[in-house]
Image (cartoon, grey):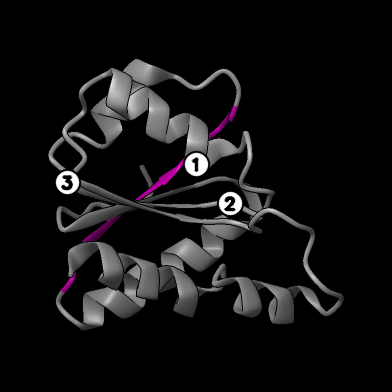
Amino acid sequence: MLREGSDAAVVTCGILTGEALRAADALQAEGVGVRVVKLAQVSPLNGKGLCAALDGVKRLVVAEDQLRTGGLGERLSALLLEQDAGIGKIRLRNVGTALPTQGSTAQLWHELGLDAEGIAQAVREVLA
């Protein structure tokens, strides 16, 4: 866990961690406390560790820079459901079902909602 917060959590890994932290900073300025959890490994998922890291949070955003099918978000959602973790609402932010168009990393992240602005918007959506 890189940042404490109880209104919602963002789970991510790798290079998107910085975007998740920037989103949490922006939301903190709005009075929203966002927990940021960075996974050290994505397979296998540590069910007990993840449930402990997300304990008390009811709203979740999973941000990943990969295709949706079989990705971290789908696997984490299934794990949390199986563990009856009490998550009430989840938003998955990922590449989608097809590879994105060409562009710089910043352009593609913005287009896909994977930049700090997009992640913050996903948190707002799960809180609505």
x%, y% of residue 15? Answer: 65, 56
Which residue lies most toward the front here? Answer: 97
- Residues under labels 2 and 1: Cα distance? 7 Å
Marks 2 and 1, the one that precedes in the sequence:
2
- 23 on left or right of 90: right
Residue 33 among those drawn in magenta: yes
> In terms of image quadrants, where is residue 65?
bottom right
x%, y% of residue 31? Answer: 14, 77
**From what the image shows, is residue 39 above or below residue 91?**
above
Residue corresponding to mark 2? 64
Instruction: Residue type at mark 2: give it.
Output: Glu
- Residues under labels 3 and 2: Cα distance? 20 Å
Residue 78 among those drawn in magenta: no
Say which residue appears at 72% left-offset and 75% top-offset: 108
What stretch of residues is rendered in magenta? 32-42
Instruction: Residue type at mark 1: give it.
Output: Gly
The residue tagged with tag 2: helix, strand or loop?
A: loop
Label 2 with label 1: CB-CB less than 8 Å? yes
Residue 58 is tagged as 3
Instruction: Residue type at mark 3: give it.
Output: Lys
x%, y% of residue 8? Answer: 23, 56
- Residues under labels 1 and 3: Cα distance? 16 Å
Residue corresponding to mark 1? 73
Q: How many marks?
A: 3
Say which residue appears at 76% left-offset and 73% top-offset: 105
- 61 on left or right of 85: right
